[in-house]
Image (tube, rainbow, N blue to C red):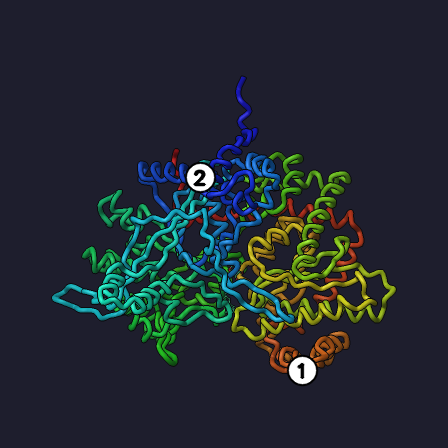
Amino acid sequence: MPLNTSAKPQSPDISKDINSHLLHTVGADPGAASSSEMMQAVAQVARAQLSERWVHTQREERKHKARRVVYLSMEFLMGRTLSNALAALNLTEGAAAGALQHAKNLEDLTGCEPDAALGNGGLGRLAACFLDSMATLGLPSFGYGIRYEYGMFAQEIQGGNQVEYPDSWLKDGTPWEFPRAELTYPVRFGGWVAHEDGKVVWKHAGEVAAKAYDMVVPGHGTHKVSTLRLWKAVAPDHIDLGAFNTGDYARAAAAKNEYENISWVLYPNDSTPAGRELRLKQEYFFVAASMQDLIKRHLDEHHTLDNLAEHVAIHLNDTHPAIGVAELMRILCDEHDMLWDKAWALCGKTFSYTNHTLMPEALETWPVSLIQHVLPRHLEIIFRINKEFLDQAARFRPGDQEFLKRLSLIDETGERRVRMAHLSVVGSHQINGVSALHSELLVRTIFTDFASLWPHRFTNMTNGVTPRRWLAQANPSLSKLLDASLGSGWRLDLNKLQGLKEHQGDAAFREQFRAIKRYNKVRLAHLIKETTGVVVSPDSLFDVQVKRIHEYKRQLLNVLHVVTRYQAILANPDAPWVPRTVIFAGKAASSYVAAKSIIRLIHDVGLTVNNDERIGDKLKVVFIPNYGVSVAEIIMPGADLSEQISTAGTEASGTGNMKLALNGALTIGTDDGANIEIRQNVGDDNIFIFGLKTPEVRDLRVTGYHPLNYYEGNPTLKAVLNAIGEGEFSPDEPGRYSALINSLVWGGDHYLLLADYASYVATQQQVDGVYRQPELWSQRAIANVAGMGVFSSDRTIGEYARQIWRVTPAPY
Ligand code: 26V
């Protein structure tokens, strides 16, 4: 009898291993272990198996001299590891049974693990989803980043205000890292450059050591794993020794800190790129260590750098690692005596680059003087790259000085600055945006001149999310229903969700689907009660906007709708209102005044609305604090409506939009980023699109946008803006929001909230209309899940692998 290979093997009994680790590794009495101790013991069981898989994968990759992809990213927003590792190792049931023997649920254990929040938001979480997919697709791959001692700050709300606290995720240690004592590389800074008879020598002024810590990223449905190698900055040994010998311990400690602060903290700034020397040092630090590591591996296997591009694809996740282009040139030319032209050709074949934003103020530039100070040799290299590039460009369009100025790697207006995006483009063979619209806008706006030179370099790779975390792990109830109706294959082939279309018309199926949504809403309502004290009804429509707080994402437009609704309910209390709970979550960059004011406003509006007895359950407004991966895993499955309301042309892609739709939320959104592709995949009838489209936004700005006309022309809007601006929600300080409201009415309303307001509110009424018909709503919600197959990060990574990296799964 052939074995049924598609059936999942039984999860093994691991209770003995758990007890053994409790006793021998954790140092706890198995008869009286706490949830946290149990979590550590179960993690140790998983860790041992991950280690075996890692050793095996590395051995095979070495044996086959596999072509690898190296993903350089300043951010990896991994979240928790335990549940994902157990699922990948098929240990979930075994661990649950083991926990039960100690009178605990598996969730009690997994909930004890702190998030690894080594990222700000979308860009960092994308990198984490990509690692999951690279491992799952069996691609030989390394992610390289920084082992920040402190990750994304923890957010608390005090009196409606955001307060930031350090995120000391490592304070109790982590079971998931493998310190690699033998993998330590020197990283040099500062000094000057000597040109000694044709030879270039960088006489550096300081040096720090980069020490490797590996995290094993398990693939699903395979024993292959990927590696996330994070670098920690440590003072070189001789520093300690020198000071110790003089007996000056305090000086030794201070000197040590000066080195080690490089990997101390993640820069949380997404309102302006952090133009600080320490940030530049972070960027170079992890790039330099990663390049040494990958070159060492390459030389071990191939003994020459001539064929580097044949065996390694290096990907730049945004411009943060762009200095790697200059670093590779330095290594090849200065340390391995390769001729410039040959090295440059090799470089261009090796690098590729993803752009994640069009916002001009978000594009990274560094003062020439700072690079001169921190990385003098790299500055010389950048100048030479620029000169040769501009010579080439001048031949392409002779006499056009403006063209050359626009292309230059150096911005000469004001203080001279190096444009990191330009360095990334000239150094890469492929450059991609992260949604169809964004990629098109890249070649029409910030990279037009480059695209005229090299049209074939520019391409699109629409983002995706991993279905293992964002469906299987976050939404076990829906996963069970999917398994029962489609089989379990959707985890590895998300297109299988299309099979749901057949069930959409089945009333019993819709009933089950609704029951699951309700269950997840109860879970979310508990979280809301726990974190905000507000009791919300799971029978109300859960309207969710969760993402970084930013003016372009327009949380304020959402608030305008909330206040509109509040006033309308008061004016017409007996109308058949669809009860709504409007849920916000997200962090504001600590120095971003407007974003922090929006958080305060959400709280003030919530206080008024939630305590107004005339409103009851018809409207509630809550802000869930400390948004992050683990909080998102509870929010996404509990949402009915997904707010994706950025000004058209501003959100590069969005990935929260994908997570919400995948969990059965309907989107209300603008024609922006990946919303457009979501619409194409779920169908026009199953999404609520409103507002100006990108060309209309541009035209309106060109012809002259006058927000005052919208204010004066729309009495409802005027009443809402007046209520907020005049202090109805802040009676103790009536002027609290006058600046915010003035920035709309008088300050140009840069993100066109007033222009989109009427269309947004009208569309919200359509949402109510559909929600009043539960059968219709669930049909549409199911259509959303069914259409999300293409937004698996497996699809995205498959495209990168084939079209950009040319890596294939190793044949073992
Ligand atoms: C945005 C902005 C906006 C203007 C002010 C300064 C500033 C600084 C940083 C950023 C974010 C830049 C990079 C980023 O996180 N992009 C996000 O990448 C996600 C993954 O591709 C994508 O889904 C989001 O749409 C995009 O904002």
Which quadrant of the structure image shows residue 691?
bottom right
Q: Is residue 285 visible?
A: yes
Identified at 80% across, 51% down, the residue is 773
| Residue 502, x across and y down, in percent | 69, 38
Q: Residues within 10 Å of mark 1 (few under 14, many from 20)?
A: some
> In the shown orientation, is residue 34 left or right of residue 623?
left
Foreground of the two, 724 or 410 = 724
Labels 1, 2: front one? 2
Residue 24 image label: 2
Mark 1 sits near ligand 1, with its Cβ under 8 Å away: no
Which mark sits nearer the N-terminus, 1 or 2? 2
Q: Is mark 2 within 8 Å of ligand 1?
A: no
Say what amino acid the circle numbered 1 marks: Gly
Q: Nearer the viewer, residue 71 or 203?
A: 203
- Name, please, the residue furthest toward the left: 197
User: From what the image shows, is residue 11 above or below residue 138?
Assistant: above
| Residue 149 horizontal/vertical position (percent) | 43, 59
Amino acid at circle 2? His
Q: Are marks 1 and 2 in contact (CB under 8 Å)?
A: no
Q: How many numbered dots are placed on residues in this image?
A: 2
* Dot label at residue 471: none
The kind of secondary structure element at disc 2 is: helix
Q: Position of residue 429 (x, y in %)?
A: 37, 56
- Distance from label 1 to label 2 (Cα)? 61 Å
Q: Quadrant of the N terminus?
A: top right
Which x, y percent locates residue 5? 53, 27
**Quadrant of the drawing holding the C terminus:** top left
Pointer 1 residue? 735
